[in-house]
Amino acid sequence: YAALGSPLRILTVTAAGPDEGKSFITANLAVAMAQGGTRVLAVGADLRRPALHRAFGLDYRVGLTSVLMGRMSLEEAVRHTEPWGVDVLPSGPLPPNPAELLGSRQMAALLEEMKQRWELVLLDTPPVVALSDAALLAARSDGVLLVVTAYQTPRDVVVAARRQLEQVGARILGVVLNRVRPSESGRYHYYYYYYSRDGSSAESPRDGRWSHAERPSASLAGRATGVMADRIPGGRDA
């Protein structure tokens, strides 16, 4: 309820550090909201080690950067996924200057276009502590979710992430505690992946796609939708 009464149209999902599972959280949240009747666009805004595309079995080499560089329109680059009902914009070719692209006027204009066409835009961004990319997008978003790994992420790293987001005026809606041990939580189990430079995963099959069991499941993110739907124009309670 951190921003109750304020429309939530663009949500940045980031992490305190690498390997926190933010892309999988983004994918599950997108599916949960789509199943609740919200028009959702999930954007692969991690232009360094993209992973969001794998959740939906897509190729990352056509997407966000293709649009920013003027090689195709947003409509041409977006992929509609079934059976999840989520529109996905993968990262596109990896550029040598990710922060420059994400902080550009073209990106600002593209975000405005996305807001006009979708009820909720989820931006899967790099970790916030080591890179400026996430902070640049967080400043242009209506809210931020910070993903933290249970039993692993140092407290000082989480504090540093919060401070960096606050410095750019980002609205932190909450923290997602990922990879909670089933024996201790009694309710949830989270899958995880490792980053690699080309967007493949050390834990994924050779074709770079996640197995069916690892694909998005609305149950992981379902608890968040009730709060979010109240702040999304046209959204409904889960």
Image (cartoon, rainbow, N blue to C red):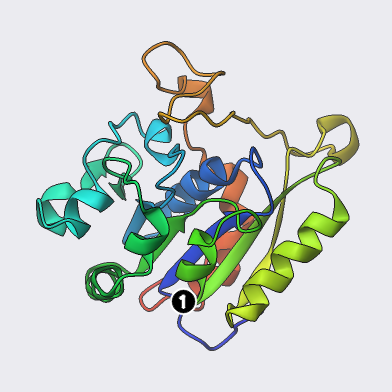
Numbered-mark total: 1
Residue that extends furthest to the front in the rendered view of this protein:
96
Residue 236 appears in the figure: no
Q: Residues within 10 Å of mark 1 (few under 14, many from 20)?
A: many
**Residue furthest out toward the top:** 206
Is 8 situated left or right of 161 in this image? Answer: left
Task: Kindly indicate the quadrant of the structure image that contains residue 111.
Answer: bottom left
Residue 199: x and y in percent read 42, 31
Viewer-nearest residue: 70 or 140: 70
Q: Amino acid at mark 1?
A: Leu
Q: Is residue 211 above or below residue 194?
A: above
The residue located at (36%, 34%) in the rendering is 56
- Image check: 104 left or right of 186? left
Residue 227 to residue 78: above or below: below
* Residue bearing the label numbered 1: 8
**Outermost residue to the right:** 184
* Secondary structure type for disc 1: loop
- Could you tell me which residue is drawn at 59 percent across and 84 percent down? 4
Q: From this viewpoint, is residue 228 visible?
A: yes
Percent across and percent down for residue 139 are: 50, 76
The percent position of residue 36, horizontal first and vertical second, equals: 43, 58
Between residues 185 and 126, which one lies in front from this camera angle? 126
Q: Quadrant of the N terminus?
A: bottom right
In this picture, residue 215 sits left or right of residue 19 = left
Q: Residue at x 70, y 63 (%)?
A: 161
Residue 186, percent from left and from top: 84, 37
Front residue of 212/103: it is 103
